[in-house]
Image (tube, coloured by chain):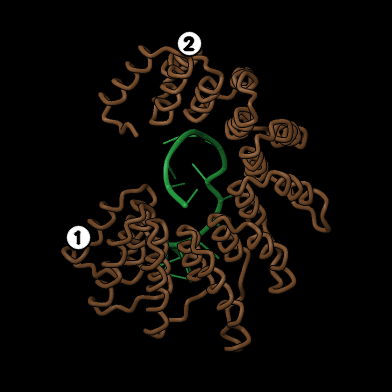
Chain colours: A brown, B green
Amino acid sequence: RAAYNAAITVCGKAGRWDRALGLLEEMPSYGIMPDVVSYNSAISACGHKAKWDRATSLLAELWLSGLKPDCISYGSAIHACSGAGRWEEAMSLLREMESVGLRPNVVTYGAAMSALANGKKWKLALELLDEVCADPKNTGSGGIQPNAVLYGAAIRACSGAGQWRVGVELLENMHSSSGVTPSLMCFNAALHGMAVAGEGKRARDLVESMHKGPRTMRPDSYSYNSAIAACGPGGEAEEARALLEGMRQRGTPPDVFSYNGVMHANVVGGSWAAALEILEEMKSKGLKPDVASYNIAVHACAVGCQWQMAIDLLEDMSEAGLTMDAFTYAHAIEACCNGGNRVAAVSLVRELRDRGMPLR
RNA sequence: GGUUAAGUUUUUAGGCC
């Protein structure tokens, strides 16, 4: 049985949830009855691919087979719902646990919080956080201590919902209110919120404060890239560039995301020609521009009415083995229209339709 | 005793409000 359980886990981690379920089903025919771990491993396998319906039906099967699900069974199923964006189902599983006498632990709450974050349900996330924080006082020894994962997910819920101020408030108060030291991911979740809101100045200040602070925290590439992204909507090209150079100097090499962010800030700021130079710069640094890089560059061409350059970039893309997506077409068509090349625009529209892609 | 569960995709058009 241990071998079966291990095999189910391996299939799950490899993304083969179907194989994992197959193994679970064939166990009885070999005279091996699945135990809770077998089911949990299978539920987890579904979770890796966000197969929430399979996960929940396995949970029901677990009950029917006379076994008793535990925190891990529910936690795995909640995680599956979370990945599928089914926050309602995740929350009802959490409540179901309570009604069948299981006490959710901090990991279970973390999975549920993640579901709320994915659904951008910031108010519900705050309520859930309050529920966990209130717990030790109400129940004494069996209480749950909130941790940085829980806070990180709660901050992410606020950030995704455009409530960056609320997220920052959580970040600033978590230590004093719950004794939890903010982790790098908590900072990054807050920075993400500033990127969503285009709060470039705030994001730059927060990155700076991470270096200084009473307890210092090294920003990583996610931190810098979010701050660079925050400079995008305001077209703060110089500031974005300064962040890119700053990360390099501090030993975090800029990556494709960093360059893409700086390019985008340049386009928004009206410096379309500078954006095109940055594409060359990233190549010269040994980085491989991705589809988004080219999309931003082609968008720069549209802003600058450079239809010929746009066509050349499409050529470069296919030479680099990259496939044009809907954004690429939209920007390229716009570049041709703005540049006055109707013929090229029409042929791109036709190509788009031939590929079965929607023409918004 | 062992095997199973949670947080940072960060970059690109338009539309809607």
Q: Is residue A41 above or below residue A106?
A: above
Foreground of the two, A116 or A1? A116
Give the chain of mark 2: A
Residue A46 shown left or right of residue A181 in the figure? left
Q: Nearer the viewer, mark 1 or mark 2?
A: 2
Q: Residue at x 35, y 48 (%)?
A: A15
Neighbor class of circle 2 (other Cα within 10 Å; few <14, some 14-19, many 20+) is some
User: Going by the picture, which residue comes out furthest to the left?
Assistant: A29
User: On the image, which quarter does residue A31 sit in?
Assistant: bottom left
Residue A116's x, y, as percent? 48, 64
Q: Which of A211 and A171 is in front in this view?
A: A171
Dot 2: element: helix
Residue A294 screen position, x and y as percent: 50, 24
Q: Which chain carries label 1?
A: A
Tag 1: residue type? Glu
Total labels drawn: 2
Q: In which quarter of the image is the N terminus of chain A?
A: bottom left
Q: Categorize mark 1 by other alpha carbons within 10 Å: few (<14), some (14-19), many (20+).
A: some
- Determine the CA span between mark 1 and mark 2: 60 Å
Q: Residue A308 carries which label?
A: 2
**In the figure, is residue A245 to the left or right of A138?**
right
Q: Is residue A97 left or right of residue A168?
A: left
Among the two numbered marks 1 and 2 on one chain, the one whose residue lies closer to the N terminus: 1
Q: Which mark is residue A26?
A: 1
